Image: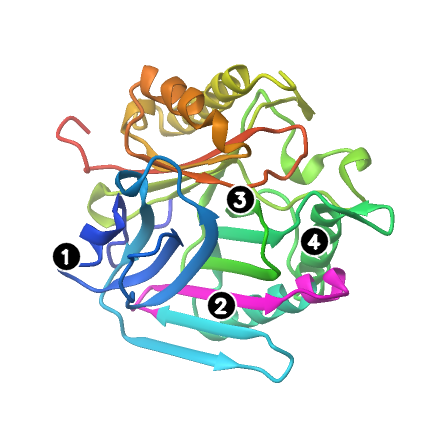
Amino acid sequence: MAPVLTSELRAQRAPATAALGGDGTPLGLILPAWPDLPQAPGATLRVPMPCLGGEACVQQGWWGGAVLQTSRTQGRDGLSLHLAQSEDFLWAVAELQVEQDLLGQAQAVYALLLQTVRESGKPQLLRVWNYLPRINAVEDGEERYQTFNRGRRRAFAAAGLSVGMGAPAACALGTAQGTLRVAVLAGREPVLSIENPRQVSAYDYPRQYGEEPPLFSRAAWLPQTGGRDLLFVSGTASIVGHATVHAGEVRAQTEESLRNIEAVLQSANARAGRPLWRLPELSGCVYVRHAEDYSVVRAALEDRGLRNFCYLQADVCRSDLLVEIEAEAQLGSFSDA
């Protein structure tokens, strides 16, 4: 039987300035670079990524609940931790200035986060956001994203956690500034991991993508009381099997990314035995490598009825990928759901 949580977890994408002025205290926030954003409550992750499309596209994810505890700590090694907890959920943000030894620093960030979720009594990772400076740069013969993946794997291994089915949904994007930022949403019960039949599972990628492959599922389905289940769709790009397709063609890459998201939704619906999840009901964030491609990417989404998305300029985890799309949906958020 699918796990059922004892309290409701809400997911919402809305203009940041409106959401911050609304009722209720957010458990966690992800806010992009925008000069007029007010100081946010909860555990906030500010991501230094330019907003594309103006203030109407300044959006963030937030996860609500009755906040029981918030705290912020700063270690002598420059590793900071900011967290907020409700009865059943934990939102934690770890940040570390990256100068040298990315491998060790990635391992340190994840070791801290894994220890935090375990000690909180909410050990199940539901969704992870990774923001890595200079993600595509090559150092010592290895791309920094590949080095980051090795450090992440070492932390999981040291914590005695296996890799494979049950991995959380996740994304990994590149920033220009030198701070490694990782946010996690964790709970008491595990998610149902969803894979994409059009793609090799990320944790099974061949060694050409690094000594240790990425660690995430294509989507994570969180059953909840009252039927308001939540689906997190990981950062999704123009990859078929394990190879990038449509190199240099931003519109084609965007459309391929949407086909992959559709395949993920079909897998989730097949598991449910009925059509619970639909593409036009998704909201989320689109990361565009080149700002001049924004209008093309947005048109491709809106042609498919996807309008509740924000657009940020960011580097994607492979240098030949021009766009990445992450999304979420919650049952009961629409009148026909």
Which of the two labelled residues, at mark 3 and mark 4, occupies the earlier sequence position?
A: 4
Q: Give me the disc on residue 117.
A: 2
Instruction: Find residue 32 and report its horizontal and vertical position in percent.
Output: 40, 51
> From what the image shows, is residue 56 above or below residue 93?
above
Q: Quadrant of residue 296?
A: top left
Disc 4 versus disc 2: distance between alpha carbons? 20 Å
Quarter of the image where the N terminus is located: top left
- Of residues 38 and 281, which is closer to you in this image? 38
Badge 3 amino acid? Cys
Which of the two labelled residues, at mark 2 and mark 1, occupies the earlier sequence position?
A: 1
> Taking 140 as reference, is 311 left or right?
left
Instruction: Find residue 125 and report its horizontal and vertical position in percent.
Output: 49, 56
> Taking 42 as reference, is 93 left or right?
right
Residue picked out by circle 1: 22
Indicate which label's residue lies in the foreground, 2 or 3: 3
Instruction: Find residue 259 and report its horizontal and vertical position in percent.
Output: 48, 18
Disc 2 versus disc 1: distance between alpha carbons? 28 Å
User: Where does the magenta region start and end?
Assistant: 85-106
Residue picked out by circle 3: 171
